[in-house]
Amino acid sequence: MKKIFTIATCIILMFLTGCFALPVEEEVLPPPVANMPEARPIRAVPVAREDVILSINVRAGYIPAQQETLHFTVAGQRIRGVFVSVGDMVEEGDIVAEFDRPYLFTQLEDARREEELYLLSLSHINTRHNMALDHAARTGIPVDDSSFLNDTRRIGNRLDIVQRRITYLQQGIDELYLRAPFDGVVTWALPVTGPMWSYIGQEAVTITDLNRHIFTLTGPATAVIQPGMNFYVVIDDEAFPVVAIDPDYYELTAIQRGGAEAFLLVTDGELPLITTLTVAMVHVVMEAAYDVIAVPNLAVSTLEGRSFVYVLEDDVVVIRDVVIGLEGNSLTEIIYGLYEGEVVVL
């Protein structure tokens, strides 16, 4: 009995082991669900009459309308001082630098005193002469004018020499000073930190006129700029009106022009503090076609010299050849191939 139970147990174990050894079927996944993308809407615009503009933004450099550097014109003279610094505002005629020649003032003072004495002497001679003539008229005794004439000639010659010397000394004193030629600001000044002597042509002070501002342009944009045309320059996001000018009329030097081909004068507005490093932007219209059939640039395709657009006809997109004109910044002129009111696809 026990043997039969053992055999039965073994058979059951073998059966169970065999069941686990059987191959297991793989799980079948459900078929994927295909999500169709939504149709992209057609971007279409109507054909209309527009102004086609081709413009560019150009960098413009700044130059002062008037700038002058003052020079010493006498050599070997002690420089008393340069009395202005960079950034100082000056008015026309202000003394900005001076030579140290005090003896000129002493000599001029002496010469003026001498001039006064000679003038007084001539006045006395003239008075005495008139008195002698009056006496002669009353008494009938003629007057000998020779002495009066000789004294007048002698003192007159001395007076002439003194007055010439005064003129010479005054010119010398005038040469002591360098004066501002116009209202402006000092943009450079000679530093004088100790004893210094001049030489001919030595630069002392540069004065710039800030009442007028000029911007210069180079490049293709200058081909369309003519004197009298109006534009705007943009500095720090602020626009200022300008007018194109003839540089010869404003007597701009070759250094000021610097190879520029067009010049714009600011006509209105208080500019911010600017220097020769200031750069402005100028909007220049190169070409324009007004009131013409036009479409966005994106609507026109060009391949091997052939230009075409996609036109929406009865909800069907068809290709159509066109003849284009001016290609502007955002619009293209259509000379032939489209009519106002039709719809093109971008």
Image (cartoon, grey):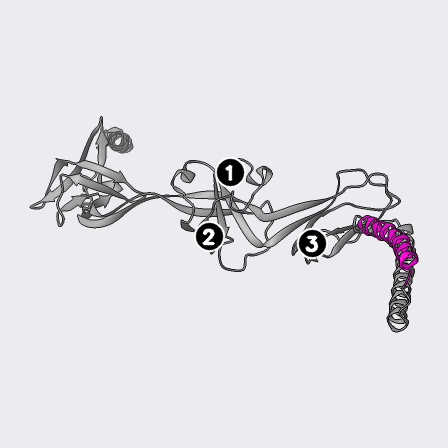
Confirm whether the magenta stretch covers residue 145: yes
| Nearer to me, 188 or 143 | 143
Label 2: how many residues lie within 10 Å, few (<14), some (14-19) or many (20+)? many
What residue is shown at x 54% (from left), y 57% (from top)? 271
Q: Which residues are magenta?
A: 143-172
Q: Position of residue 111 (x, y in %)?
A: 90, 55
| Nearer to me, 10 or 335 | 335
Disc 1 on helix, strand or loop? loop
Q: Amino acid at mark 3?
A: Gly
For marks 2 and 1, give the CA distance. 16 Å
Quarter holding the C terminus? top left
Label 3: how many residues lie within 10 Å, few (<14), some (14-19) or many (20+)? few
| Marking on residue 242 | 2
Q: Is residue 289 visible?
A: yes
Disc 3 on helix, strand or loop? loop
Left or right: 26, with 242 as reference point: left
| Nearer to me, 270 or 39 | 270
- To which residue does mark 3 refer? 87
With respect to residue 229, does 319 lie above or below?
A: above
Choose the circle earlier in sequence order: 2 or 3: 3
Disc 2 on helix, strand or loop? strand
Looking at the image, the residue that sits furthest to the bottom is 138
Looking at the image, the residue that sits furthest to the top is 304
Quarter holding the N terminus? top left
Question: Principal SS element in the magenta part?
Answer: helix
Choose the circle earlier in sequence order: 1 or 3: 3
Q: Nearer the viewer, mark 1 or mark 3?
A: 1
| Contact, mark 2 vs mark 3 (Cβ under 8 Å) | no
For marks 1 and 3, give the CA distance. 27 Å
